[in-house]
Image (tube, rainbow, N blue to C red):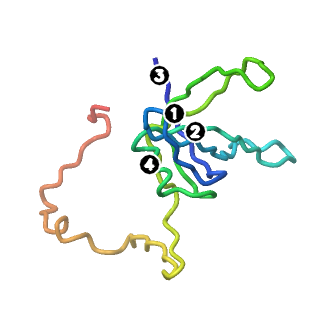
């Protein structure tokens, strides 16, 4: 069976590290994830998805991530049941995070803006490692002879 979820969204609040009664670190947070579909004449919809991370991943998230940051989460979908305050049985769906990554560059208020990388010029010479080969040993291959 396959149960994999990959999400990218913004944290809705600062993650807060907690510990279970057996001292296992856990952090719960919510990601605001924009839907890719925009209804005609409407606005983009956003889903708020609950995520839980355990142990080292929980410690990492609580230490380095803050409200509003764009993060990527890879994990699995899990359901759990509970009884609410009105004694009604409920079911919750959440993502159990295996990996959480930064999805945007680090912001540094003292640093100068980063210029985009220049695109390579199509007329620029080839690097020396490739320019030293003998063009005479080039062999033309017919497309029909390719194995794919």
Q: Which element carries disc 4, helix, strand or loop?
A: helix
Q: Which disc is residue 59 wearing?
A: 4
Is residue 1 depicted above or below 29 in this figure?
A: above
- Dot 3: within a 10 Å radius of its alpha carbon, few (fewer than 14), some, or many (20 or more) residues? few
Image position, residue 127 (x, y; %): 23, 70
Q: Are marks 1 and 4 in contact (CB under 8 Å)?
A: no
* Alpha carbon separation for disc pair 3 and 4: 27 Å
- The residue furthest front is 21
Point out the tag, 1 or 3, that comes first from the N-terminus.
Answer: 3
Answer whether labels 2 and 4 touch (C-beta < 8 Å): no
Q: Earlier in the sequence, mark 3 or mark 4?
A: 3
Q: Which residue is mark 3?
A: 2
Instruction: Compare residues 137 and 70 and report the one nearer the observer.
Output: 70
N-terminal label among 2 and 1: 2
Dot in front, 3 or 4: 4
Tell me if 40 is positioned left or right of 74 in this view: right
N-term mark: 2 or 3? 3
Q: Which residue is mark 2?
A: 51
Q: Secondary structure at mark 3?
A: loop
The residue carrying mark 1 is 96
| Secondary structure found at label 1 | strand
Q: Residue at x 52, y 56 (%)?
A: 65
Neighbour tally class for label 4: few under 14, some 14-19, many 20 plus, Cα within 10 Å: some
């Amino acid at each position: 069976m396959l149960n994999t979820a990959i999400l990218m969204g913004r944290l809705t609040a600062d993650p807060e590290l907690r510990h279970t009664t057996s001292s296992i670190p856990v952090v719960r947070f919510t990601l605001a994830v924009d839907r890719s579909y925009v209804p005609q004449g409407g606005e983009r919809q956003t889903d708020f998805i609950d995520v839980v991370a355990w142990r080292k991943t929980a410690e990492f998230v609580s230490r380095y991530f803050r409200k509003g940051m764009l993060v990527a989460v890879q994990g699995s979908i899990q359901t759990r049941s509970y009884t609410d305050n009105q004694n009604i049985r409920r079911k919750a769906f959440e993502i159990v995070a295996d990996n959480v990554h930064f999805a945007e560059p680090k912001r540094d208020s003292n640093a100068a803006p980063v210029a985009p990388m220049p695109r390579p010029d199509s007329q620029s010479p080839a690097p020396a490692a490739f320019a030293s080969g003998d063009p005479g040993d080039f062999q033309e291959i017919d497309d029909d002879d390719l194995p794919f």
